Image (spheres, grey):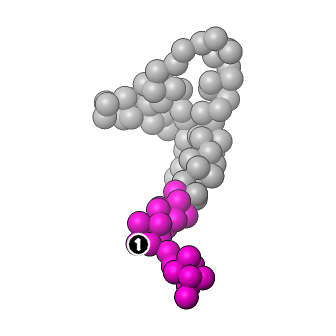
Amino acid sequence: MEKEEAKQVTDEESFLFAMELAGASSVPMVLKSALDLGIIEIIAKAGPNAYLSSSQIASQIRTFHKKQRCTFNVGPFVTSLG
């Protein structure tokens, strides 16, 4: 009887485990996006002691739209949001 009680998981523990599983995929997705957008290179070019704001980084991001085969700068749009 004691073993069954010890194996029971509370609702709170189940919820915390579900949140952990849901959050586990966000870090790889964010890292992939940062690499795809070139954010890592932008920060590296600035140097080890440089401080860059999000608007400074966004102004340097350039993306390539595959269907239109053109390059456009997303910086002004992103900086106007914040």
Identify the main secondary structure in magenta. helix
Relative horizontal placement of residue 17, taking residue 15 as reference (left or right): right
The image position of residue 67, as x and y in percent, is 54, 57
Looking at the rendered structure, the secondary structure element under dot 1 is helix
The image position of residue 70, as x and y in percent, is 55, 44
Look at 68% across and 15% down and name the residue there.
48
Q: Residue furthest top?
A: 49
The residue that disc 1 covers is: 11
Q: Is residue 2 above or below residue 31?
A: below
Look at 58% across and 57% down and name the residue there.
24
Q: Is residue 60 above or below residue 30?
A: above
Q: Residue furthest left?
A: 81
Which quadrant would residue 12 be assigned to in this image?
A: bottom left
Which quadrant would residue 74 be assigned to in this image?
A: top left
Three-letter amino acid code at disc 1?
Answer: Asp
Look at 52% across and 18% down and name the residue there.
52
Q: Residue furthest bottom?
A: 1
Q: Is residue 6 above or below residue 34?
A: below
The image position of residue 59, as x and y in percent, is 47, 26
Quick one: 82 or 4, which is closer to the camera?
4
Quick one: 77 or 2, which is closer to the camera?
2
Quick one: 70 or 42, which is closer to the camera?
42
- Magenta stretch? 1-23
Quick one: 68 or 3, which is closer to the camera?
3
Queried whether the magenta region covers residue 48, the answer comes back as no
Relative horizontal placement of residue 49, taking residue 58 as reference (left or right): right
